[in-house]
Image (cartoon, helix red, strand yellow):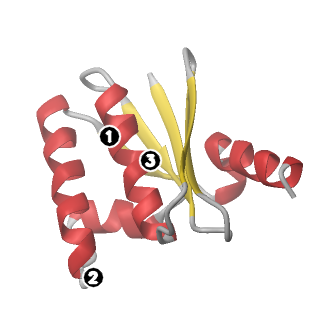
Amino acid sequence: MKFYCDGSEWNGKRSRYAIVSEKETHVIEYKEQRTNNVMEYAAAIRAATLANNDDTIITDSQLVVKQVSGEYKVREISLKVFRQALWDICQRKNLILKWVPRNENIAGKLLDKIKRVNL
């Protein structure tokens, strides 16, 4: 199964992330200020937690995909815990972590739609 995920940073009221699969959709909101990278990781970790063995996690965050693969170093100390958690789950469940352009990310489209409705 494929799990599309995306995160959205603080907009002055909330930070969000979304996960969309064939079976379910989740939109999670935090009333605290969080960065885009933290929300991208939160979305991917939650998607990986929901996934079964050999599923695919799809994100438009090159940072997340390349940090987890080891292609990029994790320079931001606060992201190291997130990177490790996602890597651990992906290894344990044999998950594929895949990057797609923003316009192909179903979860990103959902967040954009919610943003326009809540203006």
Q: Nearer the viewer, residue 112 or 63?
A: 112
Query: In percent of the image, x 44 and y 47: which residue is there?
Result: 43
Q: If you read the primary sequence from the N terminus, does the residue marked by circle 1 or circle 3 appear first?
A: 3
Drawn side of residue 12 relative to residue 6, left or right: right
Residue on which the image places disc 1: 96
Q: Which callout, 1 or 2, points to the residue nearer the camera?
A: 2
- Residue 79 versus residue 44 in the image, above or below: below
- Report the quarter where the C terminus lies: bottom right
- Amino acid type at mark 2: Glu
- Amino acid type at mark 3: Ala
x%, y% of residue 67? 28, 68
Q: Is residue 25 visible?
A: yes
- Residue 68 versus residue 25 in the image, above or below: below
Q: Quadrant of residue 110?
A: top right
Q: CA distance from mark 1 to mark 3?
A: 15 Å
- Report the quarter where the N terminus lies: top left
Q: Which structural element holds mark 3?
A: helix
Residue on which the image places disc 3: 43
Q: Which structural element holds mark 2?
A: loop
Q: Nearer the viewer, residue 22 or 110?
A: 110
Q: CA distance from mark 2 to mark 3?
A: 18 Å
Query: In percent of the image, x 32 and y 40: which residue is there?
Result: 96
x%, y% of residue 72? 27, 77
Label 1 Cα neighbours within 10 Å, binned few <14 / some 14-19 / many ≥20: some
Q: If you read the primary sequence from the N terminus, does the residue marked by circle 2 or circle 3 appear first?
A: 3
Question: Total number of numbered labels?
Answer: 3
